[in-house]
Image (tube, rainbow, N blue to C red):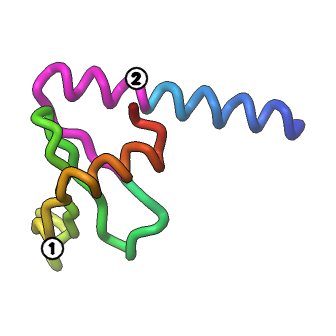
């Protein structure tokens, strides 16, 4: 695959994930946001209400624990960082 093809594929994947996020939130479901900036096993959970929480997998790997709820500015910054507006 050429570089342009890889870039187009990545862009198409990003657009698909953003569409899925909106569909999930509009349907009243949560959406998990993975970030390479977080330690291994941590992720964000976005709720239809707009709340975003930082979570981590538990030791059993069958559940997760909420570590913190982002305040309004932190949630806005995260959405801006990942182009989620």
- Is 20 part of what is drawn in magenta? yes
The image quadrant where one finds the N terminus is top right
Q: Quadrant of residue 70?
A: bottom left
Q: Is residue 81 left or right of residue 40?
A: right
In the image, is residue 47 above or below residue 60? above
Q: Position of residue 77 (x, y in %)?
A: 37, 52
The part of the chain drawn in magenta is 18-33
In the image, is residue 66 above or below residue 19? below
Q: Nearer the viewer, mark 1 or mark 2?
A: 2
Q: At numbered mark 1, what does the secondary structure look like: helix, strand or loop?
A: loop
Q: Position of residue 11 (x, y in %)?
A: 64, 31
Q: At numbered mark 2, what does the secondary structure look like: helix, strand or loop?
A: helix
Q: Quadrant of residue 47?
A: top left
How many numbered markers are drawn?
A: 2
Which of the numbered marks, if any, corresponds to residue 9? Answer: none
Q: Residue furthest front?
A: 73
Query: What residue is disc 1 on?
Result: 58
Q: Position of residue 45 (x, y in %)?
A: 21, 50
| Disc 1 and disc 2 in contact, CB within 8 angstroms | no
N-terminal-most mark, 1 or 2 = 2
Which of the numbered marks, if any, corresponds to residue 19? Answer: 2
Q: Position of residue 44 (x, y in %)?
A: 27, 56
Q: Residue furthest bottom?
A: 59
Q: Is residue 10 left or right of residue 61?
A: right
In the image, is residue 52 above or below residue 4? below
- Is 55 part of what is drawn in magenta? no
Q: Is residue 51 left or right of residue 44?
A: left
Residue at image coords 10%, 35% = 49
Residue at image coords 89%, 37% = 2
């Amino acid at each position: 695959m050429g570089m342009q093809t890889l870039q187009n594929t990545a862009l198409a994947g990003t657009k698909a994930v953003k569409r899925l996020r909106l569909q999930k939130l509009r349907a009243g479901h949560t959406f998990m946001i993975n970030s390479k900036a977080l330690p291994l096993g941590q992720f964000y959970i976005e709720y239809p209400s707009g709340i975003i929480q930082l979570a981590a997998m538990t030791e059993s790997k069958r559940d997760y624990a909420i570590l913190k709820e982002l305040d309004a500015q932190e949630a806005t910054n995260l959405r801006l960082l990942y182009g989620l507006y």
